[in-house]
Image (cartoon, rainbow, N blue to C red):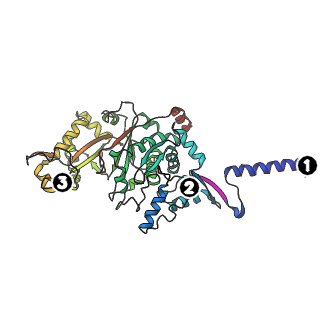
């Protein structure tokens, strides 16, 4: 080999070495390689990682899962060694630490997190909210890390940030939702022009599978509650049975052909405002309205609500989702959201005496009751059952005369809505991601 070739070969091998070293994937002794990842765990205002407190609680209660809880270097990033499969190594380690929902996650490398942060104008260190039950600070950076793990796109960041703001409001009662024995999970309703631009499903199978935006946005929120807020299954989250909605429960309002004003208007926002509404969903109850007249439909919904009234007399929030075929038929007959609410609640009314016989003892109730109800003296007075603080009617879903009732977490005051703030590079971001 002549001198020129030797110099060229040396330059090439040095370049390859430095390139692999830069990627964190240089094979060392034993074929070991490294990958750098960001830490998704929440940090409290006193500088303590929430995992430390969770590990202490596990030790005191003699629980051993997740086995590597609290076992990580305290820093924003760390380098993980692996032999051949970086994806598998990160997933196994994060799972053992309690940082996943049981499904594979996207490794949150600094490069991926940096790209996710392009979806917001806020600084990575900006604290969006402090999340119960362990009071972890949800910085923009921590939100981005968990969004990467959930499989989100950068353009989803404004929605996720607004959702974090919503669940942190006292009216949402995140501490109660995160620690209850009830099967409640966060539900997000997205309305406004951005919902269509982000391809958040509002049509057929709107609460089901097959849509990246719906699945990953909801998953990101649940990972943030788990990792930043410290709501760990069996440790702080004591749900007796849990809910599959803890993976994701996101739906957009169907704005195409909506015969009524949008939900954002109902909630007091401008017509073009992009809004996320968060509530704790306790379950779903399907309603089949095929062959029913509008009056019969109102009675049918009231009969379904009767099941909720048998459980407790007052629900802070209930969502009624009316799909497009049923909504169009009701609108043609002159029904509005206001008259629908009025008819459904009137059909469900029962004498005060019946309410008292089931829930009151000597004029008192262990349940939350709106002011004024206990002051009613006439036992024959007709009272809507169940009593509903906030009755949300949402136009969503595909074809078919199907509706759905979703009762909200009974510990909350109401559903909480926040306007979604779009970054300055919003249109550029959307154009870039669609190419």
Q: Nearer the viewer, mark 2 or mark 3?
A: 2
Tell me which numbered mark, 2 or 1, is placed earlier along the sequence: 1
Q: Earlier in the sequence, mark 3 or mark 1?
A: 1
The local crowd at label 2, few if under 14, some if 14 to 19, many if 20 or more residues have their Cα within 10 Å, is: few
Magenta-colored span: 33-46
Front position among marks 2 and 1: 2
Q: Is residue 91 magenta?
A: no
**Residue at left 68%, top 61%?**
32
Q: Which residue is mark 2?
A: 74
**Percent coordinates x, y for residue 25 in the rendering:** 67, 54
Circle 1 Cα neighbour tier, 10 Å, few/some/many (<14 / 14–19 / ≥20): few
Figure quadrant of the C terminus = top right
Q: Secondary structure at mark 3?
A: strand
Name the disc covering residue 365, or none. Answer: 3
Q: Secondary structure at mark 2?
A: loop
- Callout 1: helix, strand or loop? helix
User: Distance from label 3 to label 1 (Cα)?
Assistant: 94 Å
Q: Is residue 129 visible?
A: yes
Percent of width and height locating residue 429? 54, 35
Q: Residue at x 44, y 48 (%)?
A: 221
Residue pointed to by mark 1: 3
Residue 197: percent from the left, percent from the top? 46, 36
Determine the CA span between mark 2 and mark 1. 50 Å
The front one of 168 and 290 is 168
Q: Can you name the residue that lies furthest to the right here?
A: 2
Residue lying at 46% horizontally and 67% vertically, measured from the top left: 64
Give the side of residue 196 with respect to residue 24, left or right.
Answer: left
Q: Identify which residue is drawn at 58% across, 46% down.
A: 112
Magenta run includes residue 39 = yes
Nearer the camera: disc 3 or disc 1: 3
């Amino acid at each position: 080999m002549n001198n020129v070739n030797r110099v060229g070969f040396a330059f090439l091998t040095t370049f390859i070495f430095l390139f692999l070293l830069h990627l964190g994937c240089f094979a060392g002794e034993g074929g070991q390689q490294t990958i750098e990842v960001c830490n998704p765990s929440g940090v409290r205002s006193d500088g303590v990682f929430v995992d430390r407190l969770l590990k202490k609680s596990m030790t005191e209660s003699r629980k051993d899962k997740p086995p590597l809880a609290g076992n990580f270097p305290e820093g924003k990033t760390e380098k993980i060694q692996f032999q051949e499969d970086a994806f598998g190594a990160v997933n196994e380690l994060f799972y053992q630490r309690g940082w996943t929902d049981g499904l594979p996650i996207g490794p949150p490398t600094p490069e991926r997190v940096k790209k996710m942060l392009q979806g917001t104008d806020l600084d990575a260190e900006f604290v969006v909210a402090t999340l119960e039950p362990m009071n972890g600070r949800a910085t923009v950076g921590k939100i981005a890390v968990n969004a990467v793990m959930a499989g989100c796109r950068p353009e989803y960041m404004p929605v996720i940030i607004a959702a974090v703001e919503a669940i942190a409001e006292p009216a949402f009662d995140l501490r109660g939702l995160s620690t209850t024995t009830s099967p409640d999970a966060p539900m997000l309703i997205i309305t406004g022009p951005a919902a269509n631009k982000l391809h958040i499903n509002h049509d057929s199978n709107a609460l089901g599978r097959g849509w990246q935006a719906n699945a990953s946005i909801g998953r990101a929120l649940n990972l943030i509650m788990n990792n930043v807020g410290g709501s760990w299954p069996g440790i702080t989250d004591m749900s007796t049975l849990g809910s599959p909605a803890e993976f994701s429960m996101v739906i957009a309002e169907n704005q195409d052909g909506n015969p009524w004003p949008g939900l954002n208007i109902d909630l007091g926002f401008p017509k073009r405002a992009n809004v996320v509404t968060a509530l704790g969903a306790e379950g779903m109850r399907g309603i089949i309205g095929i062959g029913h007249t509008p009056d019969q439909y109102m009675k049918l919904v009231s009969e379904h609500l009767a099941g909720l009234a048998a459980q407790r007399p007052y629900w802070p929030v209930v969502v009624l989702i009316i799909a497009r075929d049923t909504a169009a038929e009701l609108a043609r007959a002159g029904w509005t959201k206001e008259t629908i609410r009025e008819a459904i609640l009137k059909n469900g009314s029962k004498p005060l005496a019946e309410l008292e016989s089931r829930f009151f003892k000597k004029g008192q109730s262990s349940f939350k009751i709106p002011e004024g109800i206990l002051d009613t003296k006439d036992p024959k007075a007709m009272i809507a059952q169940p009593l509903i603080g906030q009755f949300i009617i949402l136009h969503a879903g595909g074809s078919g005369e199907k509706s759905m009732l979703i009762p909200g977490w009974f510990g909350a005051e109401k559903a909480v809505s926040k306007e979604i703030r779009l970054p300055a590079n919003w249109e550029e971001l959307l154009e870039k991601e669609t190419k």
